[in-house]
Image (cartoon, helix red, strand yellow):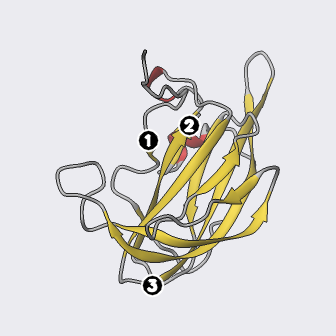
Amino acid sequence: MDTTLRTASLPLLKFSANGLVVPGSFATLVPQAADPADTFDGVITSDHAGLNIGSYGRLYIIGQGALNDPFSAKLKGWSALQDATTKLWIPSTVGSVTGTLGAAVGVDGTPVDSSWRIAATLVVVVADGEFVTLPADGGIQIAKFDQLGFQRLQFQPGPGMATKLNAVLARF
């Protein structure tokens, strides 16, 4: 009898290779002709690395800073309206959270090294569709969300005490 647990989850993806510097306020995003994946750091495409982005996602927020440093972040979705020759990319907020960095850290030699703390608390501030936090387990809290068919997802850090923020996306 095969007791292997099989899931439809795809490989984890970091939104930014090196993390995003925490700004004093959220950047305002407006419709644009350029592909957001070519314009901003922190954007994952719907067909990232040849893998479909899926319908749902789990968001693990990581940051550089001290234990319990507060942060804020948004997850934006981008859709393209297009005709035969041009596209107009339109942003929308999928969800917005506040939280604190926890005691759990990454592991050196992995994509998330020990200089990154994992969010211990998340509070949903704004949500479009299904965007919920799951109970903290072992000091780590994640958000689960419906990707709403967006062609691009963008992680956007906001004001807080952490020096850098990033997120890891698990698609399923």
**First in residue order: circle 1 vs circle 2:** 1
> Image point 43% across, 67% down: which residue?
138
Q: Foreground mark, 3 or 1?
A: 3
Q: Position of residue 136 (x, y in %)?
A: 54, 67
Q: Position of residue 73 (x, y in %)?
A: 59, 67
Q: Nearer the viewer, residue 77 or 125?
A: 125
* Mark 2 element type: strand
Q: Is residue 151 left or right of residue 47?
A: right
Disc 2 residue type? Answer: Arg
Q: Are marks 3 and 1 in contact (CB under 8 Å)?
A: no
In the picture, the disc for residue 97 is: none
* Mark 3 element type: loop
User: Within 10 angstroms of label 2, few (less than 14), some, or many (20 or more) residues?
Assistant: many
Q: Are marks 1 and 2 in contact (CB under 8 Å)?
A: yes
User: How far is disc 2 from disc 3 in space, using C-alphas?
Assistant: 27 Å
Disc 3 residue type? Answer: Asn
Residue identifier under label 2: 171
Identify the image quadrant of residue 65: bottom left
User: How far is disc 1 from disc 2 in space, using C-alphas?
Assistant: 9 Å
Considering only vertical position in the picture, is 86 above or below 162? Answer: above
Identify the image quadrant of residue 49: top left
User: Within 10 angstroms of label 3, few (less than 14), some, or many (20 or more) residues?
Assistant: some
Q: Foreground mark, 1 or 2?
A: 2
Q: In the rendered image, is residue 139 in sight?
A: yes
**First in residue order: circle 2 vs circle 3:** 3
Residue identifier under label 1: 13
Q: In the rendered image, is residue 30 in sight?
A: no
Q: Position of residue 106 (x, y in %)?
A: 29, 60
> Image point 47% across, 73% down: which residue?
22
Residue identifier under label 3: 68
User: Within 10 angstroms of label 1, few (less than 14), some, or many (20 or more) residues?
Assistant: some
> Image point 26% across, 68% down: which residue?
115
